[in-house]
Amino acid sequence: MPSHFSGKIPMSEFVHSSVHNRTGTIILNRPKALNSLSLDMVRALTASLQDWRDDAGVDAVVIRSSSPKAFCAGGDIRFFHDAGRVSPQGGSALLEDFFTEEYALNHLIHFYPKPYIALMDGVVMGGGMGVAQGGPACRVRIVTERTRMAMPEVNIGLFPDVGGSYFLSRAPGQLGQYLGVTGMTIGAADALYVGLADYFVPEAHMEALAALIDTTEGSGLRAAIDAFAAPFRATVGASKLEAERAIIDRHFAAFSVGAILDSLAADEGAFAQAARKAMLTRSPLMMAVTQELVRRGAALDVADCLRMERTLVRHNFEHGEVLEGVRALVIDKDNAPRWSPATQAEVTDEMIARFFQPVWPAWAHPLRHLS
């Protein structure tokens, strides 16, 4: 990790960290921006988790939001736009630092040695997924009926990063391709079915859950949450993705995004047509890159997935697709992005392959130390 992490937790206006009853608690507190992650927030999160990782007085970690509207809506895309326009290559030192340190944080969370409990209430998208999707040994991911989960990056000309190539590629069947290529939003039942959440707790019981966390020692917290949430699993309702699984697997197994669109066009069902309609608004190039990213991610470990994504980020900002996407949706708000290329028919295999070409020698990759 970068040398500025000295063990002392940096002060952050938007990240509040404390220890109580042998549990480290992190509260994301940037409600006006739906807790969108800034570089300072990434650094504060990393410092807290590094300090607690080897602290014998901390047995578990809880991360939550100060607002019921959002756990975390992703990275600060206005910052991406402003920093990405600094140079003709579409990058700046701060932008480089952000993605390098964010992905290192995602790796730290995935391999955390203590229970890592994420209260994914409200909006959970993009970078918010990265700080919620811990590894199998540590994760306790809780959703509510307010949860709105997505990896919607193709909508702004990016791709599912923060480990998306890893966790989407491990979803059942073609569900990871569907979520990545369409950028569609799902709720609690779908999150549980796909394997992106572990527990459902109704909104009306979140205060009781908070009280349980506050009064239970960290060493017993995982078991206490398991017992608390057990009665609610049957109340979450049916998963739409489960009901549409055969349709998703059939269409999204196609060899290219163009073939997926053709397959969906031949299906008059409402689900297929909704997916196609959404895809026609997304970046054609980044949908194709996402399809290849998820395919490659299935054969890689977490560290190599994050290194691959870090390479793609550099190529993306040099190409400028995300800058145009953010301009259209957030800056000018004309909702008319000028994608390059403009149509799926114009996307070539060479364009896709270019995004996966190494940017650095292996020994100089900014995430070379991840293992």
Image (cartoon, helix red, strand yellow):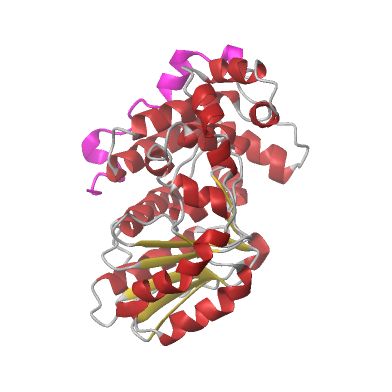
The part of the image, by quadrant, that contains residue 124 is: bottom right
Tell me, yes or no, if residue 303 can be seen here: yes
Tell me, yes or no, if residue 88 can be seen here: no
> Which residue is at 47% across, 18% downward?
351
Could you tell me residue 228's position as x and y percent?
Answer: 46, 74
Q: Is residue 197 above or below residue 331?
A: below
Q: Is residue 112 above or below residue 264?
A: below
Nearer to us in this view, 16 or 40: 16
What is the residue that sits farthest to the right in this orientation?
Answer: 334
Nearer to us in this view, 319 or 347: 347
Could you tell me residue 82's position as x and y percent?
Answer: 60, 47
Q: Is residue 116 above or below residue 277?
A: below
Q: Is residue 26 above or below residue 157?
A: below
Instruction: Give left or right: position of 349 versus 77.
Output: left
How many numbered marks have been drawn onto this rendered protein structure?
0
Could you tell me residue 136's position as x and y percent?
Answer: 31, 55
What segment carries the magenta color?
Answer: 344-371
> Which residue is at 50% across, 13% downward?
348
> Which residue is at 75% across, 31% downward?
336
Nearer to us in this view, 138 or 327: 138
Query: Magenta stretch containing residue 358, yes or no?
Result: yes
